Image (cartoon, grey):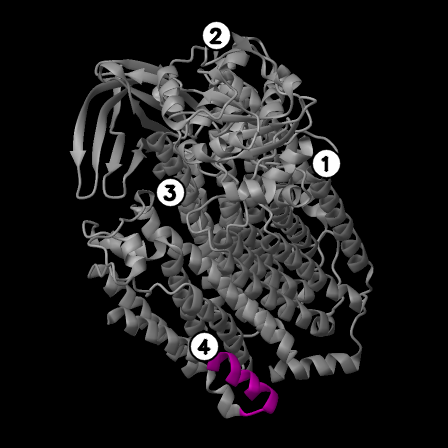
Amino acid sequence: MNRALFAIPLLLAIAMGSFFFYVMRSGIDIEALKSPLLGKPLPSNQLATIEFSGTRDPSSLHEQGPFLLNVWGTWCPACFDEHPVLNRLAQEGVRIIGLNYQDDLAAAQRWLIELHNPYEVNLIDADGQYGFDLGVYGAPETFFVNADGLLVHRQVGEFTMEMWRNELQSIWESML
Amino acid sequence: MVAELGLLALIFALIFSLLLALLPIVGWYGRYSNLLAMAKPMAQGQFVFLLISFLLLVWVFLTDDFSVAYVAQQSNTRLPYYYKISGIWGGHEGSMLLWLLILAGWTLAVAQFSKALPKDLVAVVLAVMGMVTAAFTLFTVFTSSPFERIFPDIPADGRDLNPLLQDIGLILHPPMLYMGYVGFAVAFAFAIAALITGRMDNLWARWARPWTDMAWVFLTLGIGLGSWWAYYELGWGGWWFWDPVENASLIPWLVGTALMHSLAVTEKRSGFKVWTLLLAIFTFAFVLLGTFLVRSGILTSVHAFANDPTRGQLILAILLTTLVASLGLFAWRAPQFREQLSFHPGSRESFLLINNVILVTLGVIVALLTLLPLLWPVLGMGQVSIGAPVFNMVFNPLMALLIFFMGFGQLLQWKKDSLKTVLWPMLIWLPISILLAFALTYLYGRTLNLLVVLSLVLALWILFSSLLSMQKRGVFAADGWQALRRQPPSYYGMLLGHLGVVLVVIGATFVTQYEVKRDVRMGPGTEHELAGYRFVLQDFEVVEASNWVADQANMQVFRGQRFVTELQPQKRDYFIAGQVMTEAGIQSRLHRDLYVSMGEPLTDGDWSFRLQVKPMVPFMWLGTLILCLAGILAVLDRRYRRGDDYE
Amino acid sequence: MKQFMILVWLSCVAMAWAVEQTGSQSPLASQTSIFEFHFEFANDEERLRYQQLTRQLRCPKCQNNNVSDSDAPIARDIRQRVYQLLNQGFSDEQIVEHMIARYGDFVTYRPPFGWRTAIIWLLPMALVLLAAWSAWRVIKSRAKQQVKPLNQAEKAKLSAWLEAN
């Protein structure tokens, strides 16, 4: 038997240890779920709007330019925290579409009046079926859709102005 | 003040462990026998101070000193005293201290009970254990001290122990599991000592073996208790989920079982030496890997104290240092233990080899499948879940194969035996057992479920093989009673151990294949029928304890017109912790469990319920107990042959 | 270590509960129970398929739990969709694919076979083959070794050694 064979366990252990250190130090978020819709168009469906402006199909909204589809509800505290950031972005000219997810219509309308309305239009998804087709698993979620109607990025959970400046803004600008 | 004394005691223990790690090694290289002799008192000192430290923590818990952060987090004035104590090992810091205490306990036991062993070997074994203790004591003192204070905002009361942990299961399961986990440090230390001293003979194996067996018994018991606890305490009747944290205990068990068997070859035939060393190192390495996985939160199993990356990296550093040092030593020194033991393909050695290969393959595969999901996010390829379907697909066939070979292995003799002496009876038996299994399956379930058939074939296979083995030893001859008495306990240990495995397999297969569950809506007077049992809801009542209030359903179960039992499932509101728990109502009989859990209140005073009938569940617990008994018998055997050298 | 696993569960339960309280999921949808007692099944086989599917699907919100045992709102949504699709006559594979199209491979405990996931099956298979091959080789080589009977000098040495021990 070759003496070198005796070193194999050692090498395996070192390889494995380095892998763990890499994973822990690289800061890769191993829990972030990637949307299977990336690079694909949004699912097509006719949804009513909070503004009573007829129905809209999210998969054809890109014809007026790229946009963010923000999934929110009045029952969601993180959405409340995120709202000022959306207001700010809307001011800066970012096009934001709302998807009011599993919510009460009257409460949603009151929310938009009291907290300002950053959304170009708000689609109603009261039973959550459209959100399900989007793969939403917790609000807020924000879908970045480019001018071709393809999903470029999905942000799960609340984002802050700082996160926007650091990572999200460049994604948005690359879509313009 | 008491908490500070506890920390002080811990630091004293650290000093003792550092000295224990250092002095005997220096003594070994410099041949100073007075330094070698220091090992025992150092091991004693280390244990005493860890014990003091632990008792002081108990004291702090019992006196409700909420200025100690860990107490405030784990306990509450309303908690009964036994949960106050068990709350110590309900969280990271306290469980680390228990881990250390148990490690020191094993070290002390080695120091006390190894009088017949060469002094220098024992000293080196103790030193290696001292190194492990020192590393983890350092870790505990600097990153995970349970004695940390919170100033100045001392809470008036604690946050209460996690309700899931307020249970007899938590009192027993972690200490047992740690006894097993940490016990493998002894086998590891023996292996390292063999590599350092260059001495590894039958005597070495004879001494390493009972320690390994004991650790294995505790680990088996710990895993079994954990499974049992999950089964009745979580409220849904699941008992194994292939969760990373469970796998973390299963992997050392698989590799440890291999070690136990390979030690037999090393002891009786002076063979498989290099392999035994490697297994001893790997078993402990997997223990450390499990500790790392569980306490670092690197895997997607979210658990409560998974959120400190520095702790994770430190444990990883300890793990890697241990591995690099021990495997480096192995690469350097193990080649001297190469042997070319010869044995016939039909001998016990070759079947023990097969046993080892399968068990280690199982362990490595479980480890890989547990860790593999990390790969996808690292490569930026999204997320993949590897769960029960994949594990079962790989684990079950290999397990079946293992049991199949086990049937031959336990019949064969050492060195040279011919498969032929056992092959024919076994081969004739095989079709009979298959037919029998089909018949039994049909009689039992009126379907021909192939997995059930397979589990029965394996059971009959082992049963027949055991009978054949006893027959070969003359048990069924005229003076059978004498032959029965002549067999050493380890022989019965072997037979029982294999029987235990089969029982667990039967229980697990039947419950997964034949369990029925139904979600129903029930109010007082409603009844539902499931698998021949009639569940009749009598009424609801409110039950109170010091830290919870529960809605309880009183449900009677009938089989036909015959009253079977009354079950009392509860929905408990632990108002201090602010958590709601499902306490299932269970009636257990050997052939089935009735399992009722309460869901949520509905309109009109109704509740939703989950009714389950789960066949053969107790077989798993019984099998586990028999496995433990088997291990204990094996240990007993070593004891009374202590005087003589070779059989 | 099981208590840590219990904590896994607890955090799921607690998370689901907290979610219910703070409302990261709509309170409108939270009227239904974790126990789907209101689902009617045409026959036992369909019920079994439902139970197996909900055990195979993983709850995306709580990290290691199937949707059958999880009371997270998203798990409930998935259960309802599974039930709908079952009633519409979808096969098990189609239902799992439906979920993967929305939640990714993460959602199933049995990853679909493909180039991205081939390693999950190939690696264990390779290991088993390697193990079988090495066991075969060792047994063969050990069997070949000649066992020479001891000569006189060796016998003397052995008995001397045996006495010494």
Q: From the image, tell me which residue sits under label 4.
A: B17
Above or below B416: residue C148 = below
Mark 1, secondary structure of its residue: helix
Q: From the image, tell me which residue sits under label 2.
A: C42
Residue B206, image x, y percentages: 55, 69
Is C45 magenta? The answer is no
Task: Judge whether residue B446 can be spotted in this image.
Answer: no
Q: CA distance from mark 1 to mark 4?
A: 47 Å
| Amino acid type shown at disc 1 | Ala
Query: Comparing marks 1 and 2, which lies closer to the viewer?
Result: 1
Q: CA distance from mark 1 to mark 2?
A: 37 Å
Nearest the viewer among B590 and A168 is A168
Q: Earlier in the sequence, mark 4 or mark 3?
A: 4
Q: From the image, tell me which residue sits under label 1.
A: C118
Above or below B14: residue B503 = above
Residue range highlighted in magenta: B17-32
| Amino acid type shown at disc 3 | Trp
Residue B451, image x, y percentages: 58, 28
Label 3: few (<14), some (14–19) or many (≥20) C-alpha neighbours in 10 Å: many
Mark 2 and mark 4, same subunit?
no
Which residue shows up at 22% across the image and 29% down it?
B551
Is B31 magenta? The answer is yes
